[in-house]
Image (cartoon, helix red, strand yellow):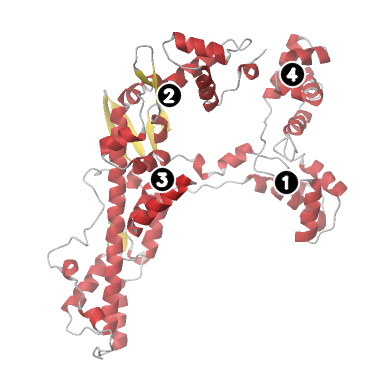
């Protein structure tokens, strides 16, 4: 709560433009193009450079001329607000021989070859719920039953489970659609929907989900039969990996148990998971930076979508020039000039903000690349140095909050994969020699130790701690447990395999 209050106080000290700049810095490359499009729609004084199309915007010169035609030859008559328009200074906008405004582009000499085909592929896909609804046609249902089935499908979570109580679905239909039904009819339709693809859909819990999938497999397969018996009678023991108890209870041999468990682990715990992942925008990672190892020399480039060719509309400057050359300056024309100036100023600010954004991104990434040079050359996580936000803030002379915004929302593509910038930040840990190493290095070694363990006798946290200490890392058992959890690795008992 305190943190939120401090952030609110900080925002209160900033101007609206500074706040907008902060928000613009947070925008990832994937949505920057949409943000620029919004600005182009809102501000006709802003346009793309060489690629701008005249028919995309109304001709501003026509707007100005139409204003003049409406007023005819009427002189501007004082009405008490004359002073508001008398001091309009447009000299910086209309100086002859000065093309600063028309050429006020974002094109940077650092990006001479970044003209790319801006065509964005349109992705066509079917959502999870649409996939289920499309299968309703296979059931012979009347309109009323179809409405009930649609309500049931609408109640299924994105992961494929029907966690809503049957009685609640009955109430939903009664109150929202005025459809009378009962729990027996709902359960009957649920059983029919459970026959839909993907297998396991509309289950109420994990046990039912896995059993539904097993029912689709050959029932004469001993492994399938064994798997069904385990889940039906010893589900809790299976989740806790108490295999000895399962063997004893079902009188199964080691081979039979291994085959049955093999069948279970190949099942899908979240039948709707694949659809849910495909429909999340964040499943698309658009790199903001690219790092290339050119014979030992790291080369950093910014995604060209971060450096769009923007400029001020020449038509709007021509309007100001015509106003400046004219002898008659009536009230409506002066109002139009004020409006034009505001739009041009807003466009100039937006172009400046975009340019400041790309320079901030480059400055931050260059510092990270230099700091973690060995990793970008080798891809070896154990070579990563301890690095916190303050380290990069000190190098770039940027505020820590600015570095944080860049690190939390930007990605870099390397020959070893694509990483979020946040990946390169980590705390330090001391070795026996007093050297400070990155906790990322310790986590990598911990992960390697667990990966190489005997799965029949997994390493306990106590054993892992001793092994790390033997390698010279001063680390406590509780720290090992914390790192293991951060790596999403279960405790030794749950890592045990037959």
Q: Which residue is mark 3?
A: 28
Q: Choose the circle earlier in sequence order: 1 or 3.
A: 3
Q: Say the numbered circle drawn on residue 250.
A: none
User: Taking 259 as reference, is 160 above or below it?
Assistant: below
At x 77%, y 33%, the residue is 208
Q: Are marks 3 and 4 in contact (CB under 8 Å)?
A: no
| Dot 3 or dot 4, earlier in sequence | 3
Identify the mark nearer the N-term, 4 or 1: 1
Circle 3 Cα neighbour tier, 10 Å, few/some/many (<14 / 14–19 / ≥20) = some
Residue 365: quarter of image: top left
Q: Residues within 10 Å of mark 4 (few under 14, many from 20)?
A: many
From the top left corner, tell me how far across and down residue 57 is, in percent: 36, 67
Mark 4 or 2, which is nearer the eye?
A: 2
- Quote the CA–CA distance across marks 2 and 1: 47 Å
Q: Nearer the viewer, mark 2 or mark 1?
A: 2
Tell me the crowding category of disc 2: few under 14, some 14 to 19, or many 20 or more residues within 10 angstroms, Cα based: many
Q: Position of residue 236 (x, y in %)?
A: 75, 24
Q: CA distance from mark 3 to mark 4?
A: 46 Å
Q: Which numbered tag is attached to residue 440?
A: 2
Mark closer to the chain start, 2 or 1: 1
Q: What residue is shown with label 4?
A: 260
- Name the residue: 34% across, 40% down: 400
Q: CA distance from mark 2 to mark 3?
A: 25 Å
Q: Quadrant of the C terminus?
A: top right
Secondary element under disc 4, as helix, strand or loop, is: helix
- Residue under label 1: 135
Please name which of the two marks, 3 or 4, marks the residue nearer to the observer: 3
Marks 4 and 1 sit apart, C-alpha to C-alpha, by 31 Å
Q: How far apart are the alpha carbons under marks 1 and 3?
A: 37 Å
């Amino acid at each position: 709560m305190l943190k939120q209050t401090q952030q609110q106080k900080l925002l209160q000290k900033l101007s609206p433009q500074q706040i907008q700049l902060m928000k613009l810095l947070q925008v990832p490359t994937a949505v920057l193009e949409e943000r620029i499009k919004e600005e182009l729609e809102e501000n006709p004084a802003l346009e793309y450079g060489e690629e701008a199309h005249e028919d995309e915007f109304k001709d501003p010169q026509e707007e100005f001329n139409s204003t003049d035609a409406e007023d005819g030859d009427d002189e501007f008559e004082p009405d008490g607000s004359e002073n508001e328009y008398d001091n309009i200074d447009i000299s910086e906008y209309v100086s002859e021989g000065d093309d600063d405004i028309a050429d006020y582009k974002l094109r940077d000499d650092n990006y001479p070859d970044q003209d790319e085909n801006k065509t964005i592929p349109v992705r066509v896909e079917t959502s999870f719920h649409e996939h289920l609804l499309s299968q309703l046609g296979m059931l012979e249902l009347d309109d009323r039953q179809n409405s009930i089935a649609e309500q049931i499908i609408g109640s299924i979570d994105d992961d494929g489970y029907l966690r809503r109580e049957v009685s609640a679905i009955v109430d939903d239909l009664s109150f929202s659609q005025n459809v009378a039904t009962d729990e027996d009819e709902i359960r009957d339709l649920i059983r029919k929907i459970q026959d839909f693809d993907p297998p396991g859909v509309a289950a109420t819990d994990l046990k039912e989900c896995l059993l539904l999938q097993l029912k689709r497999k050959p029932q004469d397969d001993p492994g399938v039969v064994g798997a069904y018996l385990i889940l039906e009678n010893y589900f809790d023991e299976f989740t806790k990996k108490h295999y000895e108890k399962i063997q004893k209870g079902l009188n199964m041999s080691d081979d039979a148990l291994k085959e049955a468990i093999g069948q279970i682990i190949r099942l899908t715990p979240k039948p709707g998971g694949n659809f849910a992942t495909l429909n999340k925008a964040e499943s698309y990672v658009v790199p903001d930076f690219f790092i290339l190892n050119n014979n030992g020399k790291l080369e950093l480039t910014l995604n060209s979508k971060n450096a769009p060719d923007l400029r001020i509309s020449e038509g709007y400057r021509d309007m100001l020039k015509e106003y400046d050359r004219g002898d008659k300056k009536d009230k409506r024309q002066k109002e139009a000039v004020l409006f034009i100036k505001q739009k041009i100023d807003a466009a100039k600010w937006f172009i400046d903000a975009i340019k400041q954004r790309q320079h901030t991104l480059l400055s931050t990434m260059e510092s990270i690349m230099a700091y973690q040079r060995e990793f970008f050359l080798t891809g070896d996580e154990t070579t990563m140095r301890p690095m916190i936000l303050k380290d990069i803030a000190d190098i770039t002379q940027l505020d820590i909050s600015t570095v944080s915004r860049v690190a939390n929302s930007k990605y870099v593509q390397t020959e070893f994969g694509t990483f979020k910038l946040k990946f390169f930040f980590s705390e330090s840990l001391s070795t026996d020699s007093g050297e400070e190493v990155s906790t990322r290095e310790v986590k990598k070694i911990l992960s390697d130790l667990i990966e190489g363990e005997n799965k029949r006798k997994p390493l306990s946290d106590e054993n892992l701690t001793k092994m790390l200490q033997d390698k010279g890392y001063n680390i406590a058992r509780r720290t090992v447990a914390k790192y293991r959890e951060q790596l999403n690795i279960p405790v030794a008992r749950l890592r045990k395999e037959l």
